[in-house]
Amino acid sequence: MMRRLGPTTLALAAFAALVSVYPLVMPSSYGVGIGITAGAMAAGSVGFVLLLGYAHQLALGQAGFCMIGGYASAILTVRYHWDPVPALLAGVVVSTAIAWIVAVPILKLRGFVLAMGSLALHLMLIVFAYEMQPLTGGALGTYGVPRFALFGFVLTTDLAYYFVIWGIVLLFVAIGLNIDRSCVGRALKAIAVSEVAAAAVGIDIVRHKVQMFVVAAAMASVSGSLFVHFLRAMDPSVFGFAFSLNLITAVIIGGLMSIWGAAIGATAVTALREGLRGLSLPMWESVIMGALTVIVLLAFPRGIAGFIGKVFARLSGDGSAPRPSLIEPVASALPPCADRGRAGEALLEVCAVSRAFGSLKAVSDVSFTAPAGAITALIGPNGAGKTTLFNLICGSQPVDSGTVLFRGAPIERLLPNEIASRGIGRTFQNLQLFDNMSVLDNVMSGRHRFHTSAVLPVSIHTLRVRRDEDEASRIARECLRFVGLRDAETLLPGELAFGHQRLVEVARALALQPTLLLMDEPASGLNDTETERLAGLIARIAMLGITVLLVEHDMRLVMGLADTVVVMHHGQKIAEGLPDRVRADSAVIAAYLGAEVDERVA
Amino acid sequence: MSALLEIDGLVAGYGRTQVLHDVTLEVRAGEIVALIGANGAGKSTLLNAVMGLVSIAAGDIRFAGKSIRRLPTAAIVREGLVQVPERRQLFGSMTVEENLRMGAFAFRDRSRIATLMEQQFEQFPILRERRRQSASTLSGGEQQMLAIARAMMSAPRLMLLDEPSLGLAPLFVTRIFDQIKALRQNGGTILLVEQNARVALSIADRGYALESGRIAVAASAAELLYNPHVQDAYLGGAGSSSRAMEERIRAMRRAMQANAAAPRQSIQVT
């Protein structure tokens, strides 16, 4: 925590210093005007970087919310003589309300729906602005917007307004940074990489997308209001599609994964546009803008902020050699188990579950029970339906019929994140780690279900949020120690060897404090020595009271560890029982274990 | 027999991290050479370095006597090297046949492509049955066969095979390794990276154990199987069999349970 606080404070100070020095360098009213324009745009970019850069949600019509803010300020101050601040806040209220109404249905769908939906909304607002002449002034717009005022004091100079705007930018950046370092920031990054894995640690995907869409809309609305008080007028052309594109350009040039990048990018785009205007080549303006954007991206793939970060990392000499990760076979610290379930309780009951894909019956009429505290193994040939059954239990696929009971309550209609939040953790056959965050953050994301992820407390980084973070980081470290991974916290998962990444996934699942842990082929890709170590880890997990359901091909692991073995073939359960009984079962030998008797491909 | 692939004093890594330190190995024509080692030892990095996917700091890689160190990956494939990547990396939405065609991307000659495809269907009859199915609908074992067949479509002189047994049921592991043996009998040369050291060494001619980016042991496959160090590090201990490992795991679990029955040690955090 301390480590992260230092540079951030430094950066905020440097930022404030730059903002104060600029008017001394460019004291002309033209210069200050550019500063105001850049600041107003930066305010809108900060929310947008969280939506586009962090959560990878492409909203093409972001300027629509600037428009709502702009009109709210213009109409309320000119026609109804409101003060600028309440008018601005009214714009925020309208923007967030519209954003929420639009986002809830749109963000349930994936792909380009949001891009098209937000574009359509923007288009509707433009038409509305032209047509509702009595309210908006139509194409002529609304004139005579007063100067901005704070607490009744009118800001009579542009310079004063310049400082107010950049103060707001600073506030937004601080909010953005707080979101970035909270569980919400991790959730957004997780959603960007793998929605399946995000849901598996209990992250409510739709909720977080909607939340960020609304935050971005609110900030865009403020940006629109601020613009209007500088322009002193509002008409439908101010926030056209070009403005949406400028916002996107600003966020990309600045650096998609950086809150600072948004402010830097907005400034760069404004400066570029003004510089080009000085050349008076209106035809070429957008061509040159486009070309420069491409050049910046080629030179700095992670944007200007990414480049600055790299330079600083090099200067501080921190980046010379990342410490290699080590394994210590047996660790002492145990991660706590939230809720063990009573011994002997039928923790998970799969009852007559079926699932078909077209004519293929992937799982048909399968029933079994995983008793609390035991290790249950699920085996069968490739294509037997194990993974499908696994997905049915996790909620990532719906059942056609049958029911899945967890602690006596049906869970087959719940969403994956709801199932995870009830205490069912999982690991993936093909690793699903979040490659855009450190190993420690990956494991901390497993704590999501215990944390408040409401915007307000997260934005101001309340004491509760701070406690949550400290606890998450402590438990995450404990989990990493428990799986036997050392000195890996600051590395990216991609920098670790495959087997170590697998341990990170186990640690992430343990951070959920699961009652039930589902492991999908944890030994695949491990050699014998590592497999034996994994067996030790799974046994220790079971000793914590965590119930384990294991899908695995390594028979030494399955037969050595499992209390009960369930065998599937062609979507059906063909055997169930103690390891030794299953091993001797002739149907199991023929279908799976292999013997001289039967060599035909199923 | 002369060496087809010679790796000489190779130093390589990703960005700031150096993974391989002074690795020297060779693969002769007609051999299966197994490369075994723990996770993170640098096995996949070595294959990636050969294919020109990793920056090389020092050393040389020669293929059929010619240095390929500075060649781009596409040119290396044209020289006759091909990699079957870890986790298969198939084109999931394409059919089996389309995947095979992608493997022959460098060839224009249609009759040659047809001949190569026929060869693959002979070697892997199940793929002929599934030729119109999309690759993602195949089972794990079939996908691995398709990955190998796709690589064979470039008519390689040397195949780099990365973890073919990954995620496969015991029955399919045996089957895949039988296929790999058959490839060699048809004149193929294979550098095989495998976690399942016992199976890999059982079909290989020679082997290398890679540890922390260095070659720790190099010998014939038979010698490696009985090398005490190799047994300890990769085969689960001396004289170990699958059954013995299973018994050890079972004993360990029993011991833990017995311990727990005694005074319980637990940490509860709210």
Image (cartoon, grey):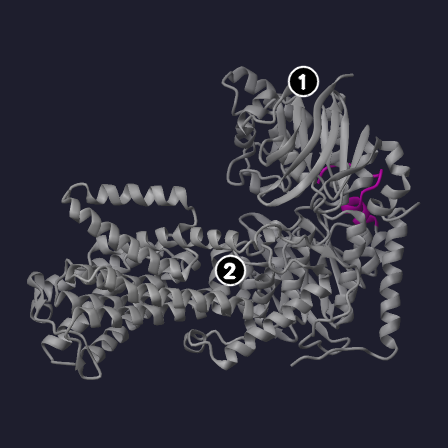
Tell me which segment is drawn in magenta: A586-602
Residues beneath discs 1 and 2 located on the same chain: no
Residue on which the image places disc 1: B65
Is residue A14 something one can see in this rendering?
yes
In front of the other: A434 or A323? A323
- What percent of the width, then of the height, locates residue B252? 87, 62
- What percent of the width, then of the height, locates residue B26? 74, 26
Q: Residue at x 20, y 69 (%)?
A: A159
Q: Identify the amino acid type marked 1.
A: Gly
In front of the other: A478 or A241? A478
- What percent of the width, then of the height, locates residue B55? 58, 36
Horizontal side, residue A471 vs residue B241: left or right: left
In front of the other: A58 or B43? B43
Task: Point out which mark residue A190 bears.
Answer: 2
Label 1 sits on a secondary structure element that is: loop
Query: Cα distance, mark 1 to mark 2?
Result: 47 Å
Q: Quadrant of residue A598?
A: top right
- What percent of the width, then of the height, locates residue A23? 24, 64
Q: Is residue B101 above or below residue A398?
A: above
Label 2 sits on a secondary structure element that is: helix
Is residue A60 something one can see in this rendering?
no
If the image is split into quadrants, where does the N terminus of chain A sit?
A: bottom right
User: Can you name the residue that lies furthest to the bottom here?
Assistant: A152
Task: Point out which mark residue A3 bears.
Answer: none
Horizontal side, residue A255 vs residue A477: left or right: left
Magenta stretch containing residue A601, yes or no? yes
Mark toward the viewer: 1 or 2: 1
Disc 2: which chain?
A: A
Horizontal side, residue B120 vs residue A289: left or right: right
Q: Is residue B81 above or below residue A456?
A: above
Q: Identify the amino acid type marked 2.
A: Ala
